[in-house]
Structures are given as C-alpha cells and as structure tokens.
Amino acid sequence: MKIEILGTGCSKCKKAFESVEKIVKELGIDAEVVKVENIQDIMKYGVMITPAIAVDGEVKIVGKIPTPNQITEWIKNAK
C-alpha cells in the first residue's frame, strides 16, 4: 500500500503526514508513506488545495487534515 501526502510543506501538510504515519504504525501495517511536494506532481491528481491524501493513487481528502478514524478506514478498505 502506498499513501501519499500531497502538499508543499505547510503546517497542515506536515500534520497530515504525521497523523498518517502514526496510524500506520499503530495498525502495524506495511505501507509506504511518502510526501509529494512537487506542485506538478500534485496537480497530476487534480488537487488544487492542500493538504490532500491519496491511497494507492486514489485521492481520499483535499484541503483538510483527516481524522484518525478516516485514515484508519481508508487503510482498512484498501487492504
């Protein structure tokens, strides 16, 4: 599983990354969590507002920091 945090490095983007990493660790799953900071790469997803999160290439949320429950649900549904 690949989870991408789309954002240019703002505080909300960093918080989203930290939240995803924490949930992945708590669930003990094998997932690659990466930051995508290049604006051209972010726009390939059609994202105009950050932070955004994509799980296995599918954008799950845009412009918000997800709740732990949302992150957990995305991970469970992607398995």
Image: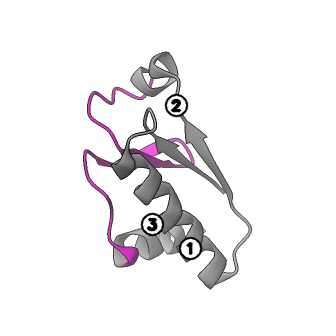
Residue 74 - label: 3
Could you tell me which residue is drawn at 53 percent across and 41 percent down?
A: 57
Image quarter of residue 1: bottom right
In the rendered view, tell whether residue 26 sits above or below residue 11: below
Across and down, in percent, residue 23 comes to: 54, 75
Residue 64 forms part of the magenta stretch:
yes
Image quarter of residue 46: top left
Q: Is 79 positioned to the left or the right of 46 in the image?
A: right
> What residue does disc 2 label?
37
Look at the numbered disc 1 and give the secondary structure of its residue: helix
Furthest-front residue in this view: 11
Classify 10 Å Cα crowding around label 3: few (below 14), some (14-19), many (20 and above): some
Furthest-right residue in this view: 30
In the rendered view, tell whether residue 33 sits above or below residue 44: below
User: Which segment is the magenta one?
Assistant: 44-68
Residue type at numbered disc 3 = Trp
> What residue does disc 1 label?
22
